[in-house]
Amino acid sequence: MKETLNTAVRLTIQITIVVTMLSMGLQVTGSQILAAVSRKSLMAKALLANIVLVPLAAFFLLLLFELPDPVAVGILVLAAAPGAPLIPKYSEIAKGDIPFSVGLMFVLSVLAIVTAPLTIDLFLTESEAFSFDVLAVISTLVIFQLIPLLLGLGIKWLFPPVQGEKLLRPSVLLSNVLVVLVIVLVLARDFRSLTGLALSNVAAMIILTIVMLVLGWYLGGPATSTRRSLALGTSAQSNGLALLITISTFPAAALAVVAFGLLNIFFNMSVALFWNRKFLPTEQNSV
C-alpha cells in the first residue's frame, strides 16, 4: 500500500510541475519579462534575496534548531527553491507591483533550475542522510520545469491571444486541482508523522517565513508597492520544485516540504490580505 502511495505521489508531483509550468508560460509575455529585467537594480536585489540570502538564512536558522534530518532537509530545499507561481497573485492581492512580480516569477523559475541544485548541494554536501547528484537533478528540472515553461511561452507567442486564453484557464484549474491532490496524497501517506512534528520544527518554519518577508521588504526600494511585491516574492517558495527535488533525492523530506509550504502559503496570504486593506500612497516604482 505504501509503495503504491509513493508511486502515486511521485507521478502526481511530476505531472503537477509540468502543468503548472505550462500555465505559467501561458501567463507571461516577453515584454513583461524584459520590463522586469530592465529594472536592473531592483532585479539584482531580488536575485540576491532569493538565491543567496534566503538559503543562508535557512542554513543559519537550522544551526540554531536541532531538527531531524528529514525536516532540516525539507526546510533547506524549499528555501533554495524560489519562483512560486503564486507570486503575481500575492502581489495583486497586496496591491503590489504586478508587472514586476510576473517578470520576477519567470526569471526565478528559470534560474532555479541551476541555482536550486547547486545551493542544496553546497549546504548539504556533508550530510550522510542526503544523496545528491547535481547534474541528475538539473536534468530532471530541465525536463519537468524548463521545457513546459518555454512551451507555454512559445504557445502564447505563436498563437492568437484567444487560443492562448482557451488553454490558460483549464491549465490553471488543472494545476490547482493537482496541487490539492499532491497535498492529500502526501498527508495520506505521512499523516501520522505530520501530527508528530515538534513545536521547534514548526517554529523554525514560521521564523524563516518571517525572515524572508523582512528581507524582501527591506530590499524592495522606496516604493511601497514594490516593497510588498518583493517581500512576498522572496517569501513565496516553489513547493512543486522542492517536492520534485526531494522525491528523487530524499523522499522522507517531502512531508516537511508540504508542512512548510502550507504554513508559507498561509502566512503570505495573510500578509497580502492585510496589505490589501492598507492605504497605498501614490508612488513611483523603484528602478
Image (tube, rainbow, N blue to C red):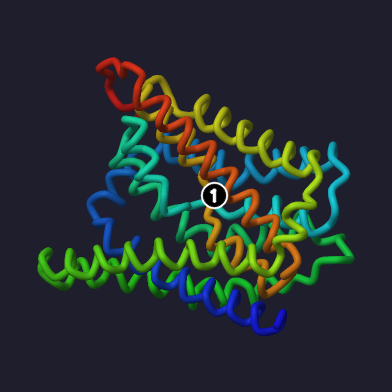
Q: Which residue is mark 1?
A: 237
Q: Quarter-wise, where is residue 178 in the image?
A: bottom left
Q: Is residue 243 above or below residue 225?
A: below
At a point 81% along the width and 66% down the height, the residue shown is: 130
Tell whether 105 sits left or right of 51.
Answer: left
Q: Point out residue 6 in the picture as x, y percentages from the top left corner.
A: 66, 78
Judge left or right: residue 106 versus residue 248.
left
Residue 93 picture location, percent across and down:
34, 35
Viewer-proximal residue, 48 or 2?
2
Residue at left 31%, top 68%? 171
Q: Is residue 93 left or right of residue 108?
A: left
Q: Quadrant of the C terminus?
A: top left
Q: Quadrant of residue 252?
A: bottom right
Residue 230 lies, with reference to residue 14, above or below; the image says above
Q: How many marks?
A: 1
Please state the horizontal and vertical placement of residue 139, each as a whole percent of the image. 57, 77
Residue at 35 percent of width and 27 percent of height? 276
* SS of the residue under disc 1: loop
Identify whether 59 is placed above or below 113: above
**Is residue 216 depicted above or below 248 in this figure?**
above
What is the three-letter code of the residue carrying label 1? Gln
Please indicate whether residue 204 sits to the left or right of residue 231 in the image.
Answer: right
Q: What is the x, y in percent for residue 81?
A: 58, 55
Q: Residues within 10 Å of mark 1 (few under 14, many from 20)?
A: many
Q: Quadrant of the N terminus?
A: bottom right
